[in-house]
Amino acid sequence: DTGVSQNPRHKITKRGQNVTFRCDPISEHNRLYWYRQTLGQGPEFLTYFQNEAQLEKSRLLSDRFSAERPKGSFSTLEIQRTEQGDSAMYLCASSSWTIEQYFGPGTRLTVT
Amino acid sequence: DAKTTQPNSMESNEEEPVHLPCNHSTISGTDYIHWYRQLPSQGPEYVIHGLTSNVNNRMASLAIAEDRKSSTLILHRATLRDAAVYYCILRDTPREGNTPLVFGKGTRLSVIA
């Protein structure tokens, strides 16, 4: 399967711990996006990359959040000092210059 | 991005057509209308997009009003697999390229066997 993959699929962590999620986009897609989705809401944009350059960060992305895309391939999203409000589904998507964005299955984070 | 308005939920019988409306009265001349859907426990998936003319693909049809202030996603024969949340999104694609999507709450479609 050559779709977008995300790991882990589920993560349970205690408040205050750091977590890191990985996204592997469709190969040769130059843009990669991170979104967050809470129950009953549509996904909300967090940040996105063109190749290795981070183009935009949402105001939702507090200083506890950091994202990287070294070498323009896979990306990681790290949350430091997690809070209960960080519990959500974290979605990654990738695209080329065409219209569609292709989404991964998401990583569900539960902060206890 | 201009705002869209969709019903919170809709229900359809299996094998019947479904018309999912979207209002976007503040759409600008260069905004494309995109539809994505999200099946349970999955990430969103692209359905269709259009600018002015009606569009058809293997998944659905998109009917766009002449004044472009509303559009309708048409599923010609609903199946149980079409039960999902459907999102109508406007994006000024030509100027901005493939930029982040702005999702609303969408319409939750239930399909009854």
Image (cartoon, coloured by chain):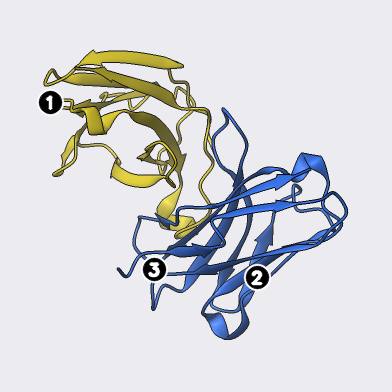
Q: CA distance from mark 1 to mark 2?
A: 42 Å
Name which residue lies at 39% across and 68% down. A96
The three-letter code of the residue at mark 2 reads Gln
Snapshot quadrant of residue A100: bottom left
Q: Which residue is mark 2?
A: A54
Residue B23 visible in the snapshot: no
The three-letter code of the residue at mark 3 reads Ser
Snapshot quadrant of residue A75: bottom right
Residue A103 in the image: above or below residue A7: above
Q: CA distance from mark 2 to mark 3?
A: 16 Å
Q: CA distance from mark 3 to mark 1?
A: 31 Å
Secondary element at tag 2: strand
Are dots 3 and 1 on a single chain? no
What chain is tagged by disc 1? Answer: B
Snapshot quadrant of residue B20: top left
Point out the image quarter for the N terminus of chain B: top right
Q: Which residue is mark 3?
A: A96
Q: Nearer the viewer, residue A107 or A59?
A: A107
Secondary element at tag 1: loop
Q: Which residue is mark 1?
A: B77
Q: Residues within 10 Å of mark 3 (few under 14, many from 20)?
A: some
Q: Is residue B109 left or right of residue A46?
A: left
Q: Residues within 10 Å of mark 1 (few under 14, many from 20)?
A: some
Q: Is residue B10 left or right of residue A50?
A: left
Outermost residue toward the bottom in this view? A71
What chain is tagged by disc 2? Answer: A
Across and down, in percent, residue B27 comes to 45, 31
Are dots 1 and 2 on a single chain? no
Give the mark toward the camera: 3 or 1. Answer: 1
The three-letter code of the residue at mark 1 reads Arg
Chain A, colour shown? blue
Chain B, colour shown? yellow
